[in-house]
Amino acid sequence: MKALDDESQLTIAACQGSVEAFETLVLHYEPRIRRMLYSLTQDSQLTQDLCQETFLAAYRALPRMKGEELHFAPWLYRIALNQLRSEWRRRKHVTWVPFSPPQGYGDDAFDEPGEDYLECPEHFEEQVGQRDLIQRVLARLPEASVACLLLDAEGFSYREIAETLQDSLSAIRSRLSRARQAFQQLYTKLEQEGR
Amino acid sequence: MKYVDIRDLPPCSLSPQCLRLIDDLDMPTATTASERLAYIEDLQDERHLRQLRSHVPNCPTCSTLLAEARRMRIQQRMMLYYYMVANEREVPATSSSIIEAIRRESEKAAVSETGSSETQARSARAPLPAVAYGTVPIPLHSRSPHRRRIFQNMLTLATVVAVILAAVGLLNRFMAHPANTASTNQSSHPGQTSNPAAPLNNDDWNSALIGLTVLSAGVVSSLNFYGYDTGSGRMTTLVSSTQTYLTVTMEGVSQDGQHLLFDETTPDQQKTYNVYSRAHNVLKVYQVVAHQGGNAIWMDTTHFLVQTIGGGVQELNAQTGLIQQKWALQAGSLTFYRQPFLYFTGAKNLESGALYRANLAQANPIPQRITNSLPDTHYWLSIDGTTIFYANRGSSSERGIYAVGSDGSHLRMLRKGSGIPIGYADDNSLMVMDQVENKFRVVKLGTTPGAPEKVVLADAAPGAVSLCGLPVQTAMTKVCDQNIELAPYGHGLLLNAYYPNGANALLYDNLHTGASHIIRSLPTGTGVQLPGWSKMSLSPAA
């Protein structure tokens, strides 16, 4: 992911207690975290809450981190995703309240990377901007797959995605590959249904 | 560009690996040391990668597959990136509130490190937070510097706790219970009420409850209840739902500050009364057909009263939902309860919009009228329970704030003008919000007739043009009860303020320091309910 020019220095300074350095990081990453969280929740209020909790949690944890070794972006995204998971777990205990963590078909449905998904490559043309359709597709994918796709779209490398999702590189390669195919299949299916 | 259909090509067993390792294959072979380490992490993948690098150039299937996969990858990335960018615009930025919270936390940490005795003294002198929605604080003892020693001495505190807890049983019988209703305009205003526990743990009344609902096509499409911690500046989600409701109303907070009473009406016309607590989350307590159920108010910490059509007024157990008692009262809306009187606005044969009271100690109480009909007026019961305050916006007599005995006697005007009562200060004097020269002021009235009033905060919502809604007419009322939530004992103020650019936001004013913070800007179409303050612990562990 394209980082701030002086992100390493800012991270070190923030770890050493510089509020100003951390504020610079907030200004850079808050929109990114916000769009990631909203893409996963579709809930504006929850997104604002989680955004705030993410940065506050990061701020509180920074003094315990080694600035020289800390990869700030994956670490921050990891906090955000953990906050989101905690929230979903917490909501599961409120029995009367329906909530909407991503519900999907699971990875198994797309385990074998087939070749037929490339049957109609041209239909991806002219589809950019169809938010509703994308939203419906993402809602049917497992959360980890959606996170993989979104992090990939943000410019994260495999290693950064692995670090964020705390998984092995090999697992991330497989998951991202399956997620891309699943996305494509669902997108095609839903788009055809909508016609 | 010539497109080759993959189905026309011979199958290749390595195709799945090509897709899986596409990003690695596209990475330059002369990679940095750290990137190389990434490959080495998985030797099998590295072996596959080496194999594919030599295989792909000679395999038309894999070459075609990879070419199409690259094309798809670019398109997907682009779609998802623009999707996220569009999503970014859907949510108001939180940077400023985050930075503000961090600065506050940083300052707090700095102060705490210095261990300044001055700070400790200032903290100990902080006025007692008042109570929750629909109650009137009754101080059990005066607050003095001596209280500092009480808090510093656990033994003394334990003694005080024991004494006060013993008194709670008696005082419970003399408490008032104002009600709240964001959904109706005749109910009483969420405010402060007596709470026997409050003087014990005055510092605990630090979380304001906030309800945000997203309205779509005339229904509530999602709701979130929050607790705003004035200490940390954080908003914590308490209840959240994306279920569709016709209405959702936060009715009020119990006297112990630990329970929120709220009701929701579903599209199948069922109205459910719920009690939320941190310990038990949401407990469905009572359900009726929607048109039969009215508003509800807390009676004490374990019982509440519900106004029902046909059933009069019912007392319910807040844990079991069992009906304890019923009274055949023609109430439009329940306002507050103070043993033994229930205050309510009239309906049917009673004068609509007028305030009445009825003695619930009697099986068939006869309503006694307290005020004339005053539509859109919120009533406040004084700390000692002897007086009712309200604002007359000019509908039936001169505009101003009036006081009347709780038995309907001795009606008098306290203050002329457009101000409205908003609660009580730590010395039990009435607090008022008014608008002067486009600024919203918090004013404390004198405790005795003729005593001068004091401006506590000269500009409670800097830059805001209304506390009601977007002003479409200059003459429109700009101060509305339902968007103002004064903390118990008047230490802070939560507001829903509207700005000239059409935006609205939740604000917190510290009435001790005069600092004003925007805690949340709100997207268009968000409904706001401010039911009161609580003692709920908002720490993550809670």
Image (tube, rainbow, N blue to C red):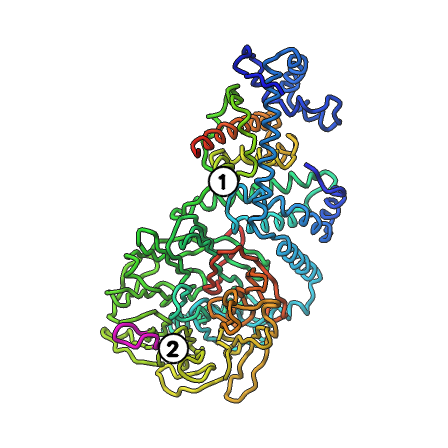
User: Is the stretch drawn in magenta largely helix, strand or loop?
Assistant: loop
In this view, the residue in front, B27 or B36, is: B27
Write down the residue under mark 2.
Answer: B374
In this view, the residue in front, B203 or B515, is: B515
**Quarter-of-image position of residue A3:** top right
**Quarter-of-image position of residue B291:** bottom left
Horizontal side of B484 relative to B105 (left or right) equals: left
Chain letter behind tag 1: A
- Where disc 1 sits, the SS reads helix
Q: Position of residue B268 (x, y in %)?
A: 31, 51
Q: Position of residue B490 (x, y in %)?
A: 54, 72
Write down the residue under mark 1.
Answer: A132
Whether residue B160 is visible: no
Horizontal side of B48 relative to B289 (left or right) equals: right
Residue shown at the point (60%, 38%) measured from the top left = B81
Magenta region, residue range = B346-355
